[in-house]
Image (spheres, rainbow, N blue to C red):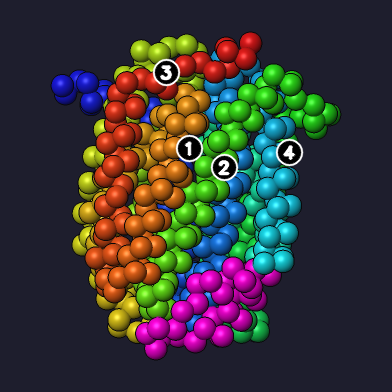
Amino acid sequence: MFKKYIGDRSFYKKVLIVAVPIIIQNAVTNFVGLLDNIMVGQVGTDQMNGVAIVNQLLFVFNLCIWGAVSGAGIFSVQYFGKGDNKGVRNTFRAKLILLGIVLIAGLLLFGFFGEALISKFLHETDGIGNAAVTLDEGLHYLWIMMVGLLPFAVTSAYSNTLRDIGQTMVPMKAGVTAVFVNVILNYILIFGKFGAPEMGVQGAAIATVISRFLEASIVVGWVHTHSDQAEFIVGAYKSLRIPMALMKQILIKGAPLAINEALWALGITMLNQCYSTRGLAVVGALNIASTISNLFNVVFLALGESVSIIIGQYLGAGDMEKAKDEDRKLIAFSVMCSVVIGFLMAMCRKVFPQFYNTQEEVKSLAASFILVTSIMMPFFALLHASYFTLRTGGKTIITFLFDSVFVWVIAVPIAFVLTHFTSMPILPLYIAVTCADFIKCTIGVILVKKGVWLQNIVNEIS
């Protein structure tokens, strides 16, 4: 039993080589995101809520971008495991085309319906916050953030492909550099330091946009000057032609994944909209709790990506027994790490909210949300690792049902009924919706154990 779930030293060394750069990048990004959030929170509750609502909308766009690159990434990681650089190059081209479509759709949506979308989250039922001010601040933030969607999309195409081929250090260095520049510019522009004008939330948006252009320039510059280590870029722009058989399979396998990410993000946004009917205090508390949770979640999120990279290469090489064995150990490692991280998060739950310039009610509620998340973290880790296992084997229809369909069929109806037809307080309501994920845990374990994901999808194309 011990050997079944616990790997040897070489196994953990391999996992850490892949996971640590991702953990560092995500940890620094989320830590700086926490600092940014605190800075905006120092300006006022209305400003913090406006930024939080817009970031919830941008979260949907970001996951659509991630879904678009991940669909093609299923193939690029297996092509790399097979040693087929031409296949990796074709999947990179597919990512560029798909991201272009998502980018245009996102700009049109935010440009024409931004105000209406923000307004859906504004409910002054608790006497905390001003909806009109929150809307105005959110719109100013959104218009500027839209400029940064282009470099974000470009970075996603390049960084995702680099991770698929095992080059996780470059995206990490670029991301870390960008977030440090972001936090410095935030301090200068939000509060008007070193002779700069005091710009509030608009300064936060400008700092983010500048940092995204910087990150894109670092990643793109490295790839084009290190073609010996990123061979997929050689001749990548000579043509955007992609073999029809491959593009067909990317759409067949990737479309459910991209749609899944979009629907899942919309589902989470709908959940937050339901929660917001309990007042702007809830919006502020959820913003604080989610920002802090993101900082602690980086370990199991990075280990999920490691499942995709490590196990995907075994599947591409046709080594199914090795894939099954190491996947089981990776999932166990992710859950064990999350038990420790969840405990630390619970211990810190009352500390972080005190950094915000907001009402005590908001701080207390945020601490309660954080406690719920910390208790559920090992189960979230199990869900995440199971999701990546199924996705890596090309079972995107199953992940679609497992992920977004579950949110819309189970979680959203529970939240909608409890918020609109009962007077249940927000905390037990939040717990009831969150505990629905136990159903997904059970389904995920069953599907992974049955081995339905053990297949080489690039050989099927050949």
Q: How dense is the environment of label 1, judged by Cα within 10 Å: few (below 14), some, or many (20 and up)?
A: many
Identify the secondary structure beneath mark 1: helix
In the rendered image, residue 86, in percent from the top left (x then y), is placed at 69, 19
**246 lies left or right of 82:** right
Tell me the residue at 37%/53% (across/down).
Answer: 411
Residue bearing mark 4: 97
Residue bearing mark 2: 259
Residue bearing mark 3: 454
Which numbered circle lies on residue 400?
A: 1
In the rendered image, residue 239, in percent from the top left (x then y), is placed at 83, 29
Identify the secondary structure beneath mark 4: helix
Q: Amino acid at mark 3?
A: Leu
Magenta: main secondary structure: helix
Tell me the residue at 69%/19% (across/down).
Answer: 245
Q: CA distance from mark 3 to mark 2?
A: 23 Å
Q: State yes or no: discs 4 and 3 in contact (Cβ < 8 Å).
A: no
How many marks overall? Answer: 4
Which region of the structure is painted magenta?
Answer: 114-143
Q: State yes or no: discs 2 and 1 in contact (Cβ < 8 Å).
A: yes
Q: How dense is the environment of label 4, judged by Cα within 10 Å: few (below 14), some, or many (20 and up)?
A: some
Mark closer to the chain start, 1 or 4: 4
Q: Amino acid at mark 1?
A: Phe
**6 lies left or right of 297:** left
Q: Amino acid at mark 4?
A: Ile
